[in-house]
Image: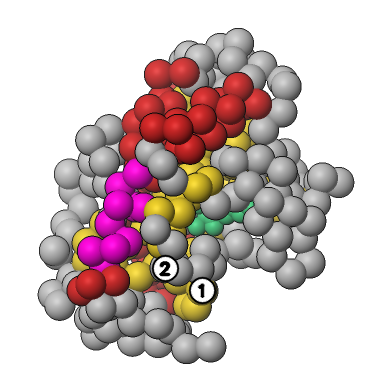
Amino acid sequence: MAISLKSFADIESMRPACRLAGEVLDYIGPFVKPGVTTEELDKLCHRYMVEVQNCIPAPLNYAPPGYRPYPKSICTSVNHQVCHGVPNERPLKKGDIVNLDITTIKDGWHGDTSRMFIVGEASILAARLCAITHECLWLGISQVRPGAKLGQIGAAIQRHAEASGYSVVREFCGHGIGRNFHEEPQVVHYGKGTEGPTLEPGMVFTIEPMINAGKAAISELADGWTIVTKDRSLSAQWEHTVRVTETGVEVLTLSAGAPACPPHIQITP
Ligand code: MF3
Ligand code: CO
Ligand code: CO
């Protein structure tokens, strides 16, 4: 399967899904406090998507080949959980860091975005991991323009993560997105920078670096979904859905509450 190019009409159709995904994160942020369970966050997001936004939570019952159906509406990855954490009854406690990953389907189109949230107050180490990973996301986004190689994204991310003393998860990557949750291309978050196809206007994909404070190795829990660091070190992830424009990049999952691009990183619109 080749990389599908989205027309301007397609992009207009994708905008609502992408904006709504960002707005779920805006909505849920204030609920992320010590004592709340990820199960409660899942229920709140589910209700907001279905009853307020009139969209579909894409994760619910999502079953790619080799996976059992995902049982919840959002992913909640706490501390050493890397991604695909399944919401549960354990209350969050002060100092936890949690990634909330939201994917909506609106009118048949997908939007996918995630952010890190600090529960109460984080250690300086945990806060730095979240901040550097956010920089990694935006450094990746800053590489996107027609004529660039897809691999430049991963190279920029790996350089910054490793220069900061962290490691990049290899087994999971960003992805093309549109009418399907996961399409080509695979957007890896490491590399030399010369790899992959040349970017063209109309390509739409996610960038979603998973950065570990310790080693890069991961393992899967018995639930068949939750990914954790093997060494139990903290892990962080941020995600946006972006499109290649005629001249640069547009971030489709921005919303009022989305943390801005760090000021030292230049984006070409
Ligand atoms: N939202 C995740 C991503 O960024 C995928 C989650 S799959 C699920 O690609 F089934 F766990 F929701
Ligand atoms: Co994604
Ligand atoms: Co996601």
Respond yes or no on whether mark 2 lies under 8 Å from ligand 2: no
Residue that carries the numbered disc 1 in the rendered image = 183
**Magenta segment range?**
11-20
Q: Is residue 39 above or below residue 22?
A: above
The residue under label 2 is which amino acid type?
Gly
- The structure's colour scheme is secondary structure
- Give the prevailing secondary structure in the magenta stretch: helix
Q: Nearer the viewer, residue 139 or 248?
A: 248
The residue under label 1 is which amino acid type?
Glu
Image x and y of residue 269, in percent: 13, 63
* Label 2, label 1: how far apart the Cα atoms are: 8 Å
Residue at x-position 71% and y-position 43%: 71
Image x and y of residue 130, in percent: 45, 37
Residue that carries the numbered disc 2 in the rendered image = 178
One can see residue 236 in this view: no
Residue at x-position 80% and y-position 51%: 224
Q: Is residue 37 above or below residue 195?
A: above
